[in-house]
């Protein structure tokens, strides 16, 4: 039933129903209640008037209600029309309809760039408003809509010779059941420009990935099949694009032992689990050889909302080879450095130790690790340490570029050793590098030779024996300042007399001078009687020193060792007494040195005896 007949039919039905009820019920009441014909006629007239009045009221009420409903519908339609127009303006949208020709709304004409007089147009005029390149596709779509009622949805560029940028319009249309065709036209220029920019950006990035030679990029779908494979991937793994496409990741580049682990990790990630961190991996090429890469991973969603895995691999083969060569070189260098007899040293600008090779432990007696961070001057004799610090300060201030010199190193055992220090400033950093060379033996030999020459010269010059022996003591003390040297001569009554002791306190010299040489009476007394080396490393506890302990300790003496010197017939001529200010034992080098000086002393004593 047509919608425009519903309201009149409803009104006619109500009137018929009301009339029928009124006539039948009123006639029945009159017949039942009135018998007089005159009165009955009069009541019939009144009944007719009441019917007219009541039917008029009924018709008025029904008409008024329909009029109010129509008014509300009209207001709603007007409001919706305004909202539709506002939405069309906001969405750059216009409407049209086709009834043999196109009828364009004002909004559509504005989007098409037409004046209001062009609200009607045919298909040829419409096609002329667009770029020639777009007309064939638009014409086919319009024919399909008009002839086959196929929904229309086509985008085309508007022909605007004097306007930039280009305007893109989207034409949509549908055929209703009644045959009427309605549609819309919308400005999609921004969307099109964004799409073009996005395609250009994607193309640039695709070209970038294709042209970068050392960054291999691969794309995989949810089943780990290759969907993207750039040229760098071919160079890295050996598979061409045709060989790789459609193949699974684990079948191409994952070593067999790691395939299950990789598959599990990817599946967990795709299901929302933890991502796969970037890391160095060892993968395999087409020929089965291994290759090290730094691989990073990313999961993206494509236009169909499907997850895709992308891997970006950087070839580390060259870097690994360089690292291997560097490690080999470092190992060779370290092996060479560790085998050197000279100490290789690296310090900061203030002389604090940064590096030491194992030769340091042999030279100083200190472990390398416990010396790092400490100043090198701390391991030198106090007088030499001050001189060393002055030169380091001069290097730091730029007054000199390096350091060369002979210094005395104080070992962990308390021994002084002569070393040659050479340090130079590193050009690339504020560091000093160089070496420590042990010259102690050479220095001792030189000093010993000087002492020999001096003694011979003094013997030839017939200097007094006391002067010669005093010189021997002083030269020996110059070689090792920690030694307090004394020479005692044995007379025919087996008494020991102090011949030279330049550093011993006078009160102590008086105590020991003229003492009888006896076994177990001091180090010198026992050595003179036994003819052997005697070492007392701690005078407080040594059994040979009860009689002399008190004056020795009062003189600040803590240790003493004695070496006898003899004539050609092995008779003891006297003794060397070596004292220390702290308990300690002499080193083998000290004993060797004193032995050489003892021979000089024996030579001088024998020469004087022959002269007498």
Image: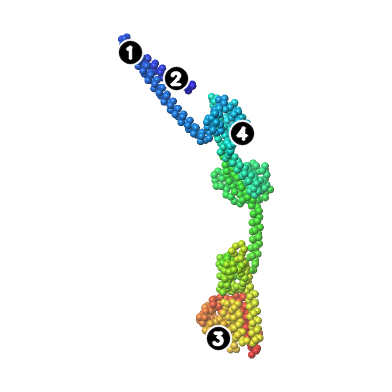
Q: Secondary structure at mark 4?
A: loop
Q: Which callout, 4 or 2, points at the residue further toward the start of the chain?
A: 2
Residue occupying image coordinates x 62% and y 31%: 136
Query: For the residues marked 3 and 1, what is the alpha-carbon distance in whole angstroms?
Result: 181 Å
> Taking 160 as reference, is 358 above or below it?
below
Which is more foreground, mark 4 or mark 1? 4
Q: Residue furthest bottom?
A: 612
Q: Are marks 4 and 2 in contact (CB under 8 Å)?
A: no
Q: Is residue 3 left or right of residue 567?
A: left
Which is more foreground, mark 2 or mark 3? 2
Q: Secondary structure at mark 2?
A: helix
Q: Is residue 94 visible?
A: no
Which is more foreground, mark 4 or mark 3? 4
Residue 9's label in the rendered image is 2
Residue 543's label in the rendered image is none
Crowd band around label 4 with a 10 angstrom C-alpha radius: few (<14), some (14–19), many (20+): some
Q: Which callout, 4 or 1, points at the residue further toward the start of the chain?
A: 1
Q: Which callout, 2 or 3, points at the residue further toward the start of the chain?
A: 2
Q: Are marks 4 and 1 in contact (CB under 8 Å)?
A: no
Q: Nearer the viewer, residue 242 or 538?
A: 242
Query: For the residues marked 4 and 1, what is the alpha-carbon distance in whole angstroms?
Result: 85 Å
Q: Is residue 448 left or right of residue 509?
A: right
Crowd band around label 3 with a 10 angstrom C-alpha radius: few (<14), some (14–19), many (20+): some
Which is more foreground, mark 3 or mark 1? 1
């Amino acid at each position: 039933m047509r919608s425009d007949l519903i309201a009149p039919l409803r009104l006619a039905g109500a009137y018929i129903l009301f009339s029928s009820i009124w006539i039948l019920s009123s006639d029945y009441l009159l017949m039942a209640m009135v018998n007089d014909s005159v009165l009955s006629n009069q009541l019939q007239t009144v009944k007719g008037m009441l019917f007219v009045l009541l039917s008029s009221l009924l018709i008025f009420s029904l008409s008024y209600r329909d009029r109010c409903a129509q008014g509300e519908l009209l207001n709603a339609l007007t409001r919706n029309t305004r909202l539709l127009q506002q939405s069309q303006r906001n969405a750059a949208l216009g409407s049209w309809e086709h009834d043999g020709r196109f009828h364009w709304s004002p909004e559509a004409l504005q989007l098409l760039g037409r004046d209001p007089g062009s609200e009607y147009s045919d298909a040829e005029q419409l096609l002329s408003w667009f770029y020639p390149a777009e007309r064939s596709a638009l014409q086919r779509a319009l024919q399909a809509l008009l002839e086959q009622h196929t929904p229309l949805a086509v985008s085309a560029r508007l022909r605007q010779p004097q306007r930039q940028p280009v305007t893109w319009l989207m034409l949509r249309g549908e055929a209703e059941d009644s045959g009427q065709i309605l549609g819309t036209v919308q400005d999609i220029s921004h969307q099109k420009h964004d799409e073009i920019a996005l395609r250009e950006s994607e193309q640039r990035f695709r070209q970038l990935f294709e042209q970068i030679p050392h960054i291999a990029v691969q794309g995989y779908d949810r089943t780990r099949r290759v969907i993207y494979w750039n040229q760098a991937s071919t160079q890295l793994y050996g598979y061409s694009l045709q060989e790789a496409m459609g193949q699974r990741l684990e079948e191409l580049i994952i070593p067999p032992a790691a395939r299950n682990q990789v598959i599990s990790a990817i599946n967990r990630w795709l299901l929302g689990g933890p991502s796969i961190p970037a890391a160095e991996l060892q993968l395999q090429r087409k020929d089965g050889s291994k290759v090290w890469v730094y691989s990073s991973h990313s999961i993206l969603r494509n236009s169909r909302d499907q997850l895709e895995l992308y891997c970006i691999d950087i070839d580390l083969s060259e870097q690994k080879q360089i690292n291997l060569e560097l490690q080999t070189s470092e190992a060779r260098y370290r092996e060479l450095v560790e085998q050197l007899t000279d100490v290789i040293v690296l310090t900061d600008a203030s002389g604090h130790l940064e590096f030491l090779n194992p030769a340091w432990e042999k030279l100083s007696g200190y472990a390398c690790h416990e010396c790092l961070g400490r100043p090198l001057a701390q391991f030198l004799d106090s007088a030499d340490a001050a001189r060393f610090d002055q030169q380091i300060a001069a290097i730091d201030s730029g007054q000199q570029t390096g350091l060369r010199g002979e210094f005395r190193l104080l070992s962990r055992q308390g021994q002084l050793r002569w070393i040659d220090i050479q340090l130079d400033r590193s050009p690339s950093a504020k560091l000093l590098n160089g070496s420590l060379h042990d010259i102690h033996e050479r220095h001792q030999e030189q000093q010993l030779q000087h002492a020999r020459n001096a003694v011979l010269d003094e013997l030839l010059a017939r200097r007094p024996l006391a002067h010669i022996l005093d010189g021997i003591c002083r030269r020996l003390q110059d070689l090792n300042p920690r030694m307090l040297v004394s020479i005692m001569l044995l007379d025919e009554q087996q008494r020991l007399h102090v011949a030279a002791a330049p550093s011993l306190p006078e009160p102590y010299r008086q105590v020991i001078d003229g003492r009888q040489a006896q076994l177990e009476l001091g180090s010198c007394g026992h050595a003179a009687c036994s003819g052997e080396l005697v070492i007392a490393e701690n005078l407080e506890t040594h059994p040979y020193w009860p009689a002399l302990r008190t004056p020795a300790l009062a003189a600040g003496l803590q240790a003493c060792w004695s070496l006898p010197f003899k004539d050609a017939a092995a008779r003891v001529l006297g003794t060397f007494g070596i004292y220390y200010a702290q308990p300690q034992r002499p080193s083998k080098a000290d004993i060797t040195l004193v032995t050489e000086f003892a021979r000089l002393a024996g030579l001088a004593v024998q020469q004087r005896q022959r002269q007498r």
